[in-house]
Amino acid sequence: MSEITLSVFGVNHRTAPIELRERIAIAPHELAEITRSLASVPGVAECMIVSTCNRVELITANSGLGVDLEAFLLDQFSLDANALSGHVYAHNGKQAVRHLFRVAASLDSMVVGEPQILGQVKEAYSVARAAGTVGGQLEHLLQATFSVAKKVRTETEIGSSSVSIASVAVELARRIFGSLYGRTVFLVGAGKMSELAARHLVQQGAGMVLVTNRTAERAHRLAEAFHGRVIPFESLYDAATEADIVITSTGAPHPIFRREHGQALLHRRRNKPMFFIDIAVPRDVDPAVNKLEGLFVYDIDDLQQVAASHIAERSREADDAETLIAREVERFHERQRAVSAAPAIVALQRQAEELRLAELKRAQARLGPLTPEQAEAVEALTRGLVNKFLHPPMQALKQAARENDTARMESICETYSLSAANEISEPGAHAETEVQDADSAANGAVQAVRR
């Protein structure tokens, strides 16, 4: 049997422009059919395809060298011969395993830590299984992939850090107020970013949303979205007294909240704290307001710095995840090498079983009729002896496989005349059978025969 090679071939957001990714994107209803087409490529023994907005990857177990996956993509999508040049990547063996582990753990994503990619890989696997293109090699690889992705999620903080401006604003508000439950939010200006920040705040329990905007139509539309209340722009300062959190983005050329406004707000609110999220450029809140006790002002640069610190934290977590993945890749290949000894072990066990049965047949004439208990004892005796004799060569085969010592494996096979091992394509159920208590079984059998 030819050696199986795991392979990943494709493009992603780092290597190919969106124009190319659009041309080779695969719609969900087409995925099964195209996966089956990939399985028909000469040399492809097993396969699956991951297709998302950011990547198209062919994951294959190849039974020979020279499998032309680029030609498959060119033909499948009617691309020019040079369309993929400089945009594709190919990983084989250990590097293919590492790449798939990283993809599923979202380390190769546009937003590191996002959870969607794992679900997309699982869906691709499910489609391929239903299409009949997944066998033992990819089954083993994908189960390991899902396990590693789960470990990355549970043993690192890769998916927990906030990185958007809106989510950072919510985190800062929580630090100031503790709970956001029932807090009043005032949107001064109705831009997209302030709407997103307000949405995050409401999701975290904020209560009434007030909206003011120079364009009344936009204010009404946004207030309706949050079941809030529209404030006429000329009533801005009076309404601000009600607000615990002010999100401002008016586009005004000068600050609309100055120090004197802050002092008046504190007086009317009896020094209850207020939080300003100023995402306007130029700024809507004078930096002097932040110097007043009880008023907390964060402008866009402040929020970006906090977000950057989260990105740095995520980078540290990504380093931890990379270390974990490197360790898991080595473990996967150790298991793969151990499994490679299975055909020889199966052949060894088969050969021993044939000898055992032949000897039992020869001995039956001398033993004469046996009671069921005696026959069972003889069976246990011979099986125990065979297991005991098989233990050393089986362990030697496994050790040689783990160490990738092909010469030693071949030497053991030659010693035991295991030429048939090369013809076995699937590890048998007995390949992982460990020697049981052969001494006990044999002793019990001998005593039963004597009785």
Image: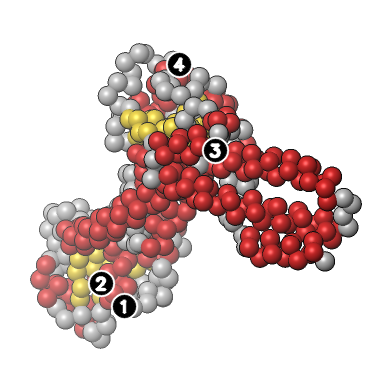
Residue type beneath disc 2: Phe
**N-terminal of the two: label 1 or label 2?**
1
Query: Which residue in the protein does label 3 denote?
Result: 416
- Is disc 3 surrounded by few (<14), some (14 to 19) or many (20+) residues within 10 Å? few
Left-right relation of 240 to 424: left
Secondary element type, mark 1? helix
Q: Position of residue 87 (x, y in %)?
A: 30, 27
Q: Which residue is mark 2?
A: 275
> How busy is the neighbourhood of tag 4: few (under 14 within 10 Å), some, or many (20 plus)?
few
CA gap, disc 1 and disc 2: 9 Å
Q: Earlier in the sequence, mark 4 or mark 2?
A: 4
| Observer-nearest of 400 and 203 | 400
- The answer to whether mark 1 and mark 2 are in CB contact below 8 A is yes
Q: Residue furthest left?
A: 288
On the image, which quarter does residue 436 sit in? bottom right
Distance of label 2 from label 3 (alpha carbons): 80 Å
Determine the CA span between mark 1 and mark 4: 60 Å
Identified by mark 4, the residue type is Asp
Q: Position of residue 370 (x, y in %)?
A: 87, 55
Q: Residue furthest front?
A: 366
